[in-house]
Amino acid sequence: MHILDLLVSGLTLGSIYALVALGFHLVFKMTGIIDFAQGDKVVIGGLLGLTLVQQGLSTVMVVLLLVVVAGLLLGIAYDAIVILPTQRNGALAAMAATVGMTLVLAHGHHLVWGPDPKPFPPVFEGGIELGPLRVSYQSMVIWAVVVAVGVGLALLMGRSRTGRGMVAAATDPLAATAVGINVSRMRALSFALAFGLAALAGVLVAPITLAGGSIGTALTIKGFTGAVLGGLNSTKGVVLGALLLGVVESQLAAVLPNGNVDPVVFIALVIILLLMPNGLFGLRRQRLA
């Protein structure tokens, strides 16, 4: 395969990882915990989208409905049922609960939609050809969404009053409460946004990865790897780390047997983190709880 084709494939793969990584980053930055169910939320989003498409709704309506309904309702419910009761016992208890939710979501969608992955119609058909290189509109849309979401999250957390309140609520809940910030509301909003992002990602990546199946665990691992590689507490870092992971993985897949790619990538990740514990682009100080 031509090196430019590998680059396009790697950027698309990395962008998929970046959408998952941004979910990790959002929850970590604004709640102080790591939500290991993020990849399975993406799968749920794709399956919900497929159901709506099969009911005759347009793609635009599907995306809007998923973002609004999944983000505002499922995200808030997820916080109220899973995170709030367990976080009272500390961040580690809440993270353990998210690990359990990966099993609940995975087996749950198998019961509803079946275990087999299903084809999903492309959100945007066709593409452009530049000589021997062909880039699909689907890939370009995913790239654009990653940039838009990354910029939006950076502005939300760095420039908006709501975003600063969410970060303050995660950093020091008692002090945030003392100055009038509703910590519970900020946390619920964080999970609503994260679930909405996962739902949007599910619709965009399902035409490439198929909808459903057992891909949630792989998305979680690769998204988290990209986020840690770039720096979990940096919006720019998680995007660049995930893109780098996708490009490297695509290049290695062209020269190594398929089963050897992941071990090489993960060994390289361990070496990088031994040398740079905060990731390639992470901030020097991180706070987990």
Image: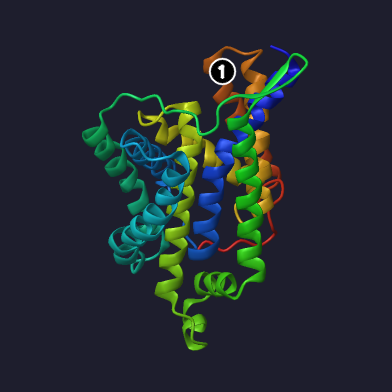
Q: Position of residue 189 (x, y in %)?
A: 44, 66
Task: Give the image quarter of residue 248.
Answer: top right
Which residue is at 41% across, 73% downward? Answer: 185
Which residue is at 31% across, 58% downward? Answer: 82
Residue 34 at least partly seen: no
Task: Give the image quarter of residue 11.
Answer: top right
Q: Position of residue 198 (x, y in %)?
A: 46, 47
Q: Residue furthest right?
A: 131
Which residue is at 66% across, 37% downward? Answer: 243
Image: 70 above or below 90: above
- Apparent side of residue 283 relative to residue 73 in the rendered image (left or right): right
Q: Nearer the viewer, residue 280 or 27?
A: 27
Q: Nearer the viewer, residue 171 or 268?
A: 171
Q: Position of residue 213 (x, y in %)?
A: 35, 28
Determine which residue is flagged by label 1: 260
Q: Label 1: few (<14), some or many (≥20) within 10 Å?
A: few
Residue 9 at least partly seen: yes
SS label for mark 1: helix
Image: 164 above or below 29: below
